[in-house]
Image (cartoon, rainbow, N blue to C red):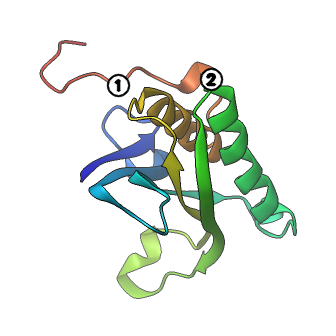
């Protein structure tokens, strides 16, 4: 297995006041294949982001969030099968020492699918675009993924 994690934050110092969300991308591999996967690879993703009160009350939030994932995969040409998952809204209230953090509603999307190729670049790019959309960034807010040791 291989896993990537990303945090979307508008602050260079990762100030929590500018937090927009986080995402995970996991690639599972079983050379024998898994019947539920219908293949040898499985991609598992998680994206979570705070949403404003009006959006959190929208009954279509789940459907729209899921549609963004399908659109991202299709836009990148990431061919797949067996797409499954959930969209969850959670309301967090803070008390005591956590008063510095305000109460908020988050949307969390868990999804998995079987890629129809061993070349996963399109799937990774679709995940990055999807995470950016859920976290409220447009295409202009998406940055290249660079190795840690590469100068910026």
Q: Residue at x 72, y 38 (%)?
A: 71
Would you say 40 lies left or right of 131 here?
left
Pointer 1 residue:
145
Q: Is residue 107 among the parts visible in the rendering?
A: no
Q: Where is residue 96 in the image (x, y as percent from the top left)?
A: 41, 87
Q: Is residue 114 above or below residue 132?
A: below
Q: Is residue 76 above or below residue 20?
A: above
Q: Count up the numbered dots.
A: 2
Labelled pair 2, 1 in contact (Cβ < 8 Å): no
Callout 1: helix, strand or loop? loop
Q: Which residue lies furthest to the bottom in this view?
A: 96
Q: In this view, does 107 lie above or below 24?
A: below
Compare residues 37 and 73 and report the one nearer the observer.
Answer: 37
Asked which quadrant contains residue 129, the reply is top right
Q: Residue at x 60, y 19 (%)?
A: 140
Q: Which residue is drawn at 86% across and 65% down?
A: 58
Q: Which residue is drawn at 47% across and 61% down?
A: 37
Asked which quadrant contains residue 143, the reply is top left
Compare residues 53 and 138 and report the one nearer the observer.
Answer: 138
Q: Where is residue 148 in the image (x, y as percent from the top left)?
A: 17, 27
Would you say 62 lies left or right of 37 here?
right
Asked which quadrant contains residue 108, the reply is bottom right
């Amino acid at each position: 297995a291989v896993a990537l994690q990303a945090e979307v934050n508008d602050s260079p110092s990762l100030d929590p006041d500018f937090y927009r969300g986080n995402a995970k991308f996991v690639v599972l591999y079983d050379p024998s294949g898994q019947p539920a996967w219908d293949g040898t690879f499985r991609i598992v993703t998680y994206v979570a982001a705070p949403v404003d009160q009006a959006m959190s009350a929208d009954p279509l939030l789940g459907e729209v969030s899921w549609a963004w994932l399908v659109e991202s995969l299709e836009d990148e040409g990431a061919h797949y099968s067996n797409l499954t998952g959930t969209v969850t809204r959670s309301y967090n209230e803070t008390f005591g020492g956590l008063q510095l953090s305000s109460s908020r509603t988050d949307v969390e999307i868990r999804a998995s699918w079987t890629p129809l190729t061993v070349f996963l670049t399109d799937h990774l790019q679709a995940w990055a675009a999807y995470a950016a959309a859920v976290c409220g960034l447009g295409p202009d807010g998406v940055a290249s993924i660079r190795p840690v040791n590469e100068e910026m």
